[in-house]
Every structure is written in C-alpha cells, then in structure tokens.
C-alpha cells in the first residue's frame, strides 16, 4: 500500500506530549506518513514551558516548500505558530494556493498555562489565516479570544454554537469548538464539541475522562482530522473519527505516571 502524506506546521515539545511529536504519532496511528515544518522549539515538560525559541518565518516557509516540492501532501494542519509574522507567512502560502486543505488549530496557551502566541497573533489568525482554513479547531478560551468575547460567557452548548458561527463568519469553511475545558453549565460527566459546517450544527458528545494525562489533546485531535482527510474521508466523518480517537487516547492513558504534571495521551492503544 502506498501511504498517504500529511504535513504539520507546528512547534516542538521536548516532553513529547504535544506539538509535532503528538501530530506525528497521530498520523502514524492512522497509517499516514507525517512531514513537518517546525515553527518553534520549546523547552518544556509535563509541568511547565521553560523557554521558547521561534524560527524565522522565512525558514518556516522554506521547510513547507521543501516538503511540498517532494511529497504529495493530501492535507495539512497548523499548531503552535508562536509569532504574528509566522501566522502571516503561513497565511500567504495558503492565500497563494500552495497549501493543501488546511486545518488550523489556533494554539494560544499550553495546558500548563504558558502563553504560546505573541501579541498581535490573534488578529493575524482572524484577519489573515482563518479565511483560508477548511476547519478551525479552537478550544473554549481560544474560541472566545478569536470571537472577541469573555470565555466566562460561554456557559452552554448554545453559546458554543454562537461563538462558532461568529468565527465561521470570518472565513473558515467549518469550525469545531471543543468543550474539553468544561462549560460552567455542563455536567462534569460530558465533554461536548460543536461542529459548525455551513448551516449545519453537529454536537459531538462524549464522556469526560477524568485524568491529568490530557497534554496534547488539541494537537492530536486536529492531527487526527488531517489524517482522516488525507485518507479521503469527508470532513464530518474525519471529525467524528478524531473525537473517538482522542477519547480512546484519554481512556488508555488515564492512569499513566509519565512526569509529574499533564502527561500525554495514549496514541497507539498501549493502555487497557
């Protein structure tokens, strides 16, 4: 079998839980060959991000073009872009038609609370990159920031739908608002995600897995969507598959003791 290929444009996580490391494991779990364009190198573990070194935008573009010149990339994603200039550089590649179908995971803050995007980045996402996205996958704080609302006002699934529509009005074909950060009005037993696809609204509900091992869930979900797209799945089905994949990963890693903080999920079914 000839493997399909996907591309992630994201940062490196030295602890291996998120970033390109999580993306590549996810691609592999779906049988997809992963390629990368690094945007930043972080010194981090399960507890903290100690430092971030960003790459020049021109080097990010050079990596992307080197990959695209030699591989048949079927789908791509962005993760941590770190600086407004990198967001704008990737947006220009998308605007020029150089990128395949693009999933944008607007990474703003790590699960340990560290800021992963410099000032001006939200505006760059909103004005330049999101209009070229097939799908945007913000969590609740990211969705609130992109829509210009207070995250404390997102208390119900209906609020998630409203903020998703606001983001969709900015250009992405679809928006997946992730409910992993518990809604104040939701039960602790559920973690609903809301997919806005044109006029269609799909609520993807699932159990909430109580575990500290949730580092890289957003990266893994968006990478799983990209893997599904690379394999030829329709967007709606790729999102459903990705939700199920992350849920299985959370269950499998629920009792792991990797590090003292937020550990990784189980990408390969190693757990029970």
Image: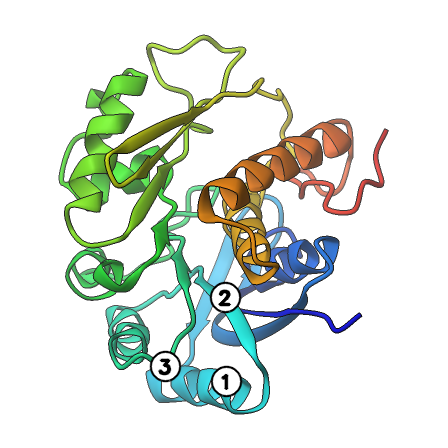
Cα–Cα gap, marks 1 and 2: 11 Å
Question: Which numbered disc, 1 or 3, marks the residue that appears first in the sequence?
Answer: 1
- Residues at marks 1 and 3, CA–CA distance in whole angstroms: 8 Å
**Mark 2 falls on what kind of element?**
strand
Mark number, residue 110? none
Which quarter of the image is occupied by the C terminus? top right
In terms of depth relative to the viewer, which is nearer, 192 or 59? 192
Local SS, label 3: loop
Q: What residue is at 50 percent from the left and 75 percent from the top?
A: 38
Q: Which of 17 and 173 is in front in this view?
A: 173
The quarter of the picture where the N terminus appears is: bottom right
Where is residue 222 drawn, in percent x and y?
50, 50
Res 261 seen here: no
Mark 3 or mark 2, earlier in chain: 2
Residues at discs 1 and 3 in contact (Cβ within 8 Å)? yes
Q: Mark 2 points at which residue?
A: 75
**Above or below, comparing residue 87 to residue 204 in the picture:** below
Question: Which residue is the site of mark 1?
Answer: 68
Q: Is residue 92 above or below residue 231?
A: below
Work out whether mark 1 precedes mark 2 in sequence or the reverse, and give the earlier one.
1
């Amino acid at each position: 079998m000839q493997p399909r290929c996907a591309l992630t444009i994201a940062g490196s996580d030295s602890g291996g839980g998120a970033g390109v490391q999580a993306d590549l494991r996810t691609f592999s779990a779906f049988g997809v060959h992963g390629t990368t364009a690094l945007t930043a190198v972080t010194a981090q573990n399960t507890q903290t991000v100690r430092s971030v070194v960003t790459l020049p935008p021109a080097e990010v573009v050079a990596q992307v073009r080197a990959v695209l010149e030699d591989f048949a990339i079927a789908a791509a994603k962005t993760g941590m872009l770190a600086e407004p200039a990198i967001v704008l550089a990737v947006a220009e590649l998308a605007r020029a038609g150089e990128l395949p179908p693009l999933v944008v995971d607007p990474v703003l803050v790590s699960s340990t609370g560290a800021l992963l995007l410099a000032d001006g980045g939200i505006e760059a996402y909103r004005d330049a990159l999101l209009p070229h996205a097939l799908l945007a996958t913000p969590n609740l704080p990211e969705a609130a920031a992109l829509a210009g609302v207070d995250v404390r006002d997102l208390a119900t699934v209906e609020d998630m739908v409203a903020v998703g529509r606001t983001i969709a009005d900015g250009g992405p074909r679809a928006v997946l608002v992730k409910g992993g950060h518990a809604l104040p009005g939701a039960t602790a037993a559920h973690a609903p995600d809301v997919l806005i696809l044109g006029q269609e609204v799909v609520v993807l509900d699932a159990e909430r897995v109580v575990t500290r091992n949730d580092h890289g869930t957003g990266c893994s979900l968006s990478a799983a969507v990209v893997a599904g797209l690379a394999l030829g799945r329709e967007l709606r089905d790729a999102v459903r598959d990705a939700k199920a994949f992350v849920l299985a990963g959370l269950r499998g890693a629920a009792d792991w003791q990797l590090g003292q903080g937020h550990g990784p999920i189980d990408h390969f079914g190693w757990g029970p």
